[in-house]
Amino acid sequence: MKLIQRASLLIFFFSINFEVWDPFNTGGSFSLAKLTGFIYLVMMLPSITSFVSRKDVKYFLNPILFFFLFLTLINILNKNSNLQNFLNISIFQNICLFYILLNHEIIDHGILEKGLISFAIGSIVFALLYSAGIGVEISAGGRVSVFGDNQNPIAMRSCISILIIIFSVIQNPLNLGKLRYILFLPVPLMIQLIVVTASRAAILSFILSVLFMVILMRNKNIWVKILIFMIALLMLAAAWMYTVQSEVLSIRLLSSLQDRDLSGREIIWQNIAPLIKDNFIFGVGTVGYLNFSQDTFGYMNSPHNVFLEILCYTGIIGLMIYMVFLYRIFLKSYELYRNKKILLPLILLFPILGTTISSQILEVKTGWILFAYIAGTSQILTNSSDVAKTNIHNMNHQDRQP
């Protein structure tokens, strides 16, 4: 059963790159990621009894659960006549996924790190399909999409996967052997995919991540440091070359700097500003925002900013609760780097922050698997602390012996 659970997790992480691919045209009712996610959850059911209710699990779980309960309460207060849509299933499913992944890491240490490599391999396959022209679409603005997915998530997944590949190859935590260097071969293609999607947040997240990786990565071996610097230099050079060649991305970057053009986000923010101002304390819930968006835009239009989205849903109270969760994720990422020299969780915060500022994360699985990886990896801090406390206790006990 343990092997089956591992396999189902690896397949699920791989398939997240195809989260919106609907090969049977069911209108969103089916996708490859939904199927593999369901299989993974079913495979984990036998292990639920072994899930722990430890303090370190509650440390991450409690604030996000309180946020969801508060959101549900606000939805009920803003419900329509037949109480439809008061429970946001997508957010609830992602919280459950986060909880299961966190516990899976506790009972099978290292599984999420393997999962991230599987996720990166899925991004490689996605990039190869783009290169082969399979599922490729070009919007009126010249931005490339694959399998109908939004350009920003495609680019962010590629950015995240490149970072995973860098650390998997250089630090080799899973002892993959020399064949791991093959993972570098498709990286230029993945960088190109980021550029052709013309995602400004993704390209900036990628550049900042690589720069801070070079600055923060610790290694006593001078040759490893030189290798890291050369890899970073080549990747940044490739990103610059592709960006210069991409007229669409170049124009979007220049318009952001010169004209403060945010692809219509500024118009959305101006429209939702009165809603936030009038409901600053409690928000209007996802139900109230759906009604507001239908009346204002004619369709469900995301704020494209998680902080503003949460302000609309749950007001300043819900945002403060959610910020506790984010703070704890950020804090543990820093502590892993400071105390254990584990840098990947800290570097992954750049694409997480880029997604939070420019897109949405509450209903997107990619963000939640990264949260689970950081929270699960931080368990080694707790385990080290427990071992230290046990040793001190034993020493004190020995000192008291006659």
Image (cartoon, helix red, strand yellow):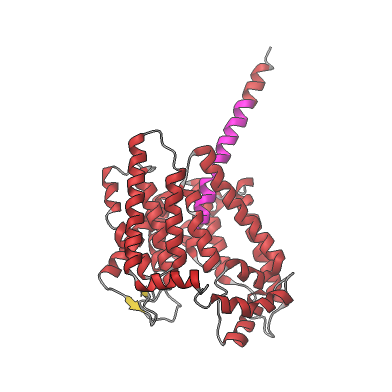
Depicted 263 relative to depicted 168: above or below: below
Indicate yes or no whether the magenta region holds residue 373.
yes
Q: Please name the residue shown 32% across and 62% down the image.
A: 241
Q: Position of residue 243 (x, y in %)?
A: 36, 65
Q: Position of residue 320 (x, y in %)?
A: 69, 60
Residue 71, percent across and down?
67, 69
Q: For the point 44% across and 42% down, which residue is it? A: 217
Residue in the image at 62% along x and 70% along y: 308
Q: Does residue 149 lie above or below 238 as drawn?
A: below
Foreground residue among 168 and 274: 274
* Residue 183 in view here: yes
Q: Residue furthest top?
A: 402
Which region of the structure is painted magenta?
368-392
- Magenta highlight on residue 228: no
Q: Is residue 333 above or below residue 188?
A: above
Q: Of 220 and 117, which appears nearest the observer?
A: 220
Tell me the residue at 41%/81% (across/down).
26
Q: Is residue 47 visible?
A: no
Identify the image quadrant of residue 135: bottom left
- 2 to the left or right of 286: left
Quadrant (top left, top right, bottom left, bottom right) of the C terminus: top right
Residue toward you, 349 or 134 = 349
Outermost residue toward the front?
A: 258
In the picture, residue 309 is in which quadrant? Answer: bottom right
Q: Main secondary structure of the magenta part?
A: helix
User: How many numbered marks does the figure carry?
Assistant: 0
Residue 136 placement (x, y as % from top left): 32, 75
